[in-house]
Image (cartoon, helix red, strand yellow):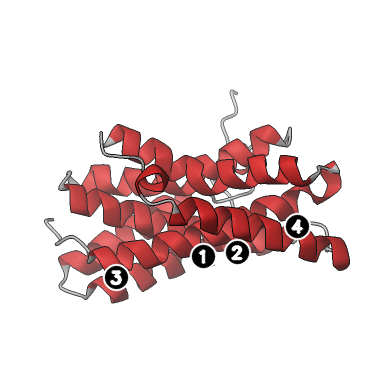
Amino acid sequence: MTPLPAPAELIYAVGMAAVAVNAASAVLETEDKKMDLVGAVVVGLATSLGGGTLRDLLLNRPVFWLVDVAYLVCGLLAVGFTFVLARRIRVRPGLFVVPDALGLALFTVVGCQVGLAAGVHWLSVSLLGVITGVVGGMLRDILVNEVPLVMRPGTLYATASWLGALTLLGCLHFGLGDATAAAAGAAVVLGLRLASIRYQLSLPTYKSR
């Protein structure tokens, strides 16, 4: 499987959207933690930039938000807007899981796109998609003193991300366009993640007899 790299414009657009959505989801999760704006900024930036930072370090490439400060500004604006809005309206408990699922889908896609552009093996590309998708959420949960979603039973998190990444790569392998492959991969991640929340889908858990 040797899919072609996605255009830089698509990577940039999806990456910016992912930063904004993940930053907003992080602020929503801090609602019951009574954090101030500084705390929300720390959690929001860790969530929105953490996965991509680890991905870039693994690829030995410049960290994306240090190269282009627009990502950092986007994250700060998303945190600030969500923080102000959440103080003015009642936030339903658990609301963060929906934008979190969308952020997982978008970051999985952009992680795969960056891996393809770097020319690594398709299996490594899929895992880079997972790393980009889940690491930010793990940092968020650790900072707010929660068990990371990826570790909780009854939630297809990393699994949804990996299957979405494989879907994207499969679409490219069969000749579909970059945008179509990205949309298909994101749809699989988002659909599986939301279905796991709604219907408590899960993988078998380890239990010694």
For the residue labelled by badge 1, is the local secondary structure a helix, a strand or a loop? Answer: helix
Which residue position is annotated with label 1? 190
**How far across and how far down the image is residue 168, in percent?**
30, 63
Identify the disc placed on residue 42.
Answer: none
Figure quadrant of residue 148:
top right
Separation (CA) of disc 4 from disc 1: 24 Å
- Foreground mark, 3 or 2, reads 3
Q: Is the Cβ of the residue at disc 2 closer than 8 Å to that at disc 1? A: yes
Foreground disc of the pair 4, 1: 4
Q: Which residue is mark 4?
A: 83
The disc, 3 or 4, on the residue closer to the chain's N-terminal end is 4
Q: Residue furthest left?
A: 2
Q: Look at mark 3 in the image and give the residue it sits on.
A: 181
Task: Give the residue type at disc 2.
Answer: Leu
Residue 145, picture quadrant: top right
In space, the residues marked 3 and 2 are separated at their CA atoms by 20 Å
The picture places residue 28, in percent across and down from the top left corner, at: 73, 55
Q: Is residue 27 visible?
A: yes
For mark 2, what is the residue? 194
Q: Which is nearer the N-term, disc 1 or disc 3?
A: 3
Check disc 3 and report its element: helix, strand or loop.
helix
